[in-house]
Amino acid sequence: MKLKMILILFVFLINFGNAFCQKGLQNLKEYDYEPYHFGFLLAYNQMGFAIKVDNSQLNKTFPSTEFENSNSKTALLKSAEPNSTTGFTIGIIGNLRVAEHFDLRFIPSLSFGERNIIYNYSTQSTQGKIDTLLLEKSIKSTLLEFPLMLKYKGNRIENARPYILGGMKYVLDLQSDAKKNTDNQNGEFIVKLKQYDIYGELGAGFDFYFDWFKMGLEAKMSYGLRDILVRDNLSMYTSAINRLNSKIFQLSVTFE
């Protein structure tokens, strides 16, 4: 899904850029010389995890009471794998010009999404029948983000300008269950994530200059630097994971 979206964006940028790069009248000639300006961001995001599995915990027998919808006495864990889902992001842009080709950008944002972990395990009934089952744990997230980015702008080609950017962001998960005292909710075990994280970010895009505003199209990858899994009460869902990091892919449209 991610690769398909990137290819669609790439083709669109080529066609859109060709139309804007034709020789003619330049829009907003003095725009990039202004000391600061503001705008807003709308984005599609794909939230996921990078999981480092503890191999010593695989093929380990756990009480089947930890597995929903299981009638056997024990269950054997086979794997724990991430599964990405889509969401959306809104943000406010603050841009400060620091040099001819460099801008400093602060974009407080709110991201909505969901991240999943798929557990593969097998059970054996009293009659000796072995069943292989999948259990998906969904973790909803509402992320309050505070990214600080350095943007390098290439040379302007008529009404289009390419750029790359990188930086860090501090993230607060407003839906974190880290402070809950129980791992069991409504008869189901929950996976807790830490409330705070630090991300590294890298992206690229194009700015297009119109008569009254500038629009940007941008692709960006963010990777969480902290292990965010809470292990206050080890269960099958946590003991098999040695490290759990966040990652987010984002396609953005900016208006400034």
Image: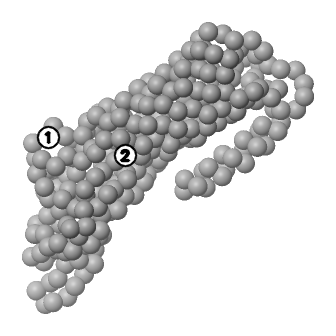
- Please give the name of the residue rendered at 26% of the width and 36% of the height, measured from the top-left corner: 195
Q: Is residue 222 visible?
A: yes
- Please give the name of the residue rendered at 21% of the width and 74% of the height, measured from the top-left corner: 59
The residue carrying mark 1 is 180
The quarter in which the N terminus is drawn is: bottom right
- Please give the name of the residue rendered at 39% of the width and 58% of the height, measured from the top-left corner: 83
Q: Quadrant of residue 12?
A: top right
Rendered view: 229 above or below 109: below
The residue carrying mark 2 is 246
- First reached walking from the N terminus: tag 2 or tag 1: 1
- Please give the name of the residue rendered at 48% of the width and 31% of the height, measured from the top-left corner: 167
Return the x and y of residue 108 as percentages of the image width and height: 44, 24
Return the x and y of residue 23 as percentages of the image width and height: 90, 28
Return the x and y of residue 143 as percentages of the image width and height: 36, 35
Q: Judge left or right: residue 183 versus residue 141.
A: left
Looking at the rendered structure, the kind of residue marked 1 is: Lys
Local SS, label 1:
loop
Figure coloring:
one colour
Return the x and y of residue 241 as percentages of the image width and height: 25, 58
* 107 vs 103, nearest the viewer: 103
